[in-house]
Image (cartoon, helix red, strand yellow):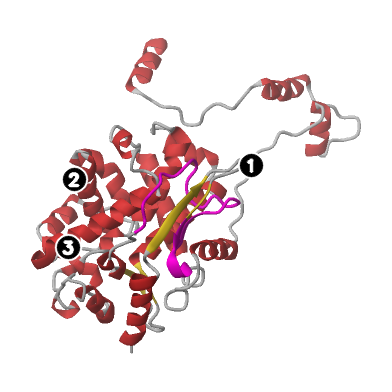
Amino acid sequence: MFQLSSYERIRSDCIAGGHKATRLGVEQGHGPLSSAIYFSKGMISLGLCTEMSLMLLGRLPTVDFLDGLSNEACTAWAKHDRDTDGWLPLWRHLADSGQVAGLLWDRWLPLQIKRVIARDLPSDLEDGRRLAVWLATTHDIGKASPAFACQVDPLADAMRAVGLEMPPYKEFSDRKLGPHGLAGQVLIQEWLIERHGWSRSETLQVGVVAGGHHGVPPTASDIKALNDHPELVRTPSCASLWRKVQWELLDRSAEVCAVSDRLVDWRKIRLSQPAQALLTGLVIVADWIASNPDLFPYYPDAADVTNQDRITSAWNGLDLPEPWQASEPSGSPQAIFASRFQLPPGSHARPVGERAVEAGRERPRPHRPWPRCTRGARRQRRLRRA
């Protein structure tokens, strides 16, 4: 049986003590960015370590975490193990997923994949990384909904105790119409419209990443079914409180991921289908990794582990191989051919081979893969063929 007293002890630590933020320190030295969000009792330390670049390139905005997340937001949960009674708060899983996505971008994702994602963004690769980390950080926001939260009685009761009412699990007959991925897409789209002035059509290209992070993007009929049952996203009797918690978590995610000031420019982007598919795939991988309790242990056992220790230990334990990087071979063209191929004695590279090596060395950079194919460019090609 789940021990409610044990849960209440962790909840008390997380809310009354450990979740009162004391400061956000942002330091920019001569080297890479090093910043951290410090919380009392060391329970939360969401930030960047110099050697691993855990979150974003560039300076993060100064965010006032003095008051921390509200009690209501702290009670939202994301993971529960019925065998061990371990659990994770939603904010913890969102933070884990975002940091994993940042490390995957920095240390695993091939450059050509990054370029496909970033080519439609105003600040290219920098925006690509910010967008990927933000989408991973927000992917499970749909778990802050009655349809999801009702599934584990003690955790649901803790949410009810702060005013987030929801029907009992066994009485929630329509909850399957609101899976958390679909609910997350709807919430992100609604948040972008209300908070940042996006149009509904503009929100779809980023919202669908949350909607499809379990492998299949929602259909129009799925979205309509959820919209016809708003009680799955917010309990009518306390809808304003549910909205407050959902918006608080999304606002915090935007601040931590340093995208609040980018959302205005991102309204104008048109992500290609390959970019949307690759971003969804990256979020799926980040979610898989962050959902592994061997790498990211559950509470209460891991409640006192600092964020930096948590992500460093997980990444070291994961031990992903670094992406292959091409390097220019040294030596003369003849020496390169001799080292690459088992040529018979007295063999020499042909002049065309030597010239190919020289041409490659003279070129400042490779051609950009998958260049933009705009309507004007296609028209110009048709005219040239004519």
Marks 3/1: CA–CA distance: 50 Å
Q: Secondary structure at mark 3?
A: helix
Which element type, helix, strand or loop, lies under badge 1? loop
Residue 321 vs 126, above or below: the answer is below
Q: At 42% from the left edge and 38% from the top edge, which residue is drawn? A: 127
Front residue (pair 222, 265): 265
- CA–CA distance in space, label 2 to label 1: 43 Å
In the rendered structure, which disc, 3 or 1, sits on the residue that comes first in sequence?
3
* Residue designated by label 1: 325
What residue did someone put label 3 on?
241
Question: Where's residue 224, x and y in %?
Answer: 13, 54
Magenta stretch holds residue 47: yes
User: The disc labelled 1 sits on which kind of residue?
Assistant: Gln
Whole-Å distance between the Cαs marked 3 and 2? 16 Å
Which residues fall within the magenta stretch? 37-66
As drawn, 386 above or below 179 = above
- The magenta stretch spans residue 303: no
The x and y percentages for residue 176 are 20, 68
- Identified at 23% across, 61% down, the residue is 245
Q: Is residue 113 above or below residue 282?
A: above
- Residue at 36% x, 65% y: name it: 20
Q: How many marks?
A: 3
Which is in the foreground here, disc 3 or disc 2? Answer: 3
Q: Which mark is residue 194?
A: 2
Residue 355, percent from left and from top = 73, 20
Examine the residues drawn in magenta and state their main secondary structure. loop
Q: Looking at the rendering, which quadrant does residue 37 occupy?
A: bottom left
The quarter of the picture where residue 1 lies is: bottom left
Compare residues 204 and 63 and report the one nearer the observer.
63
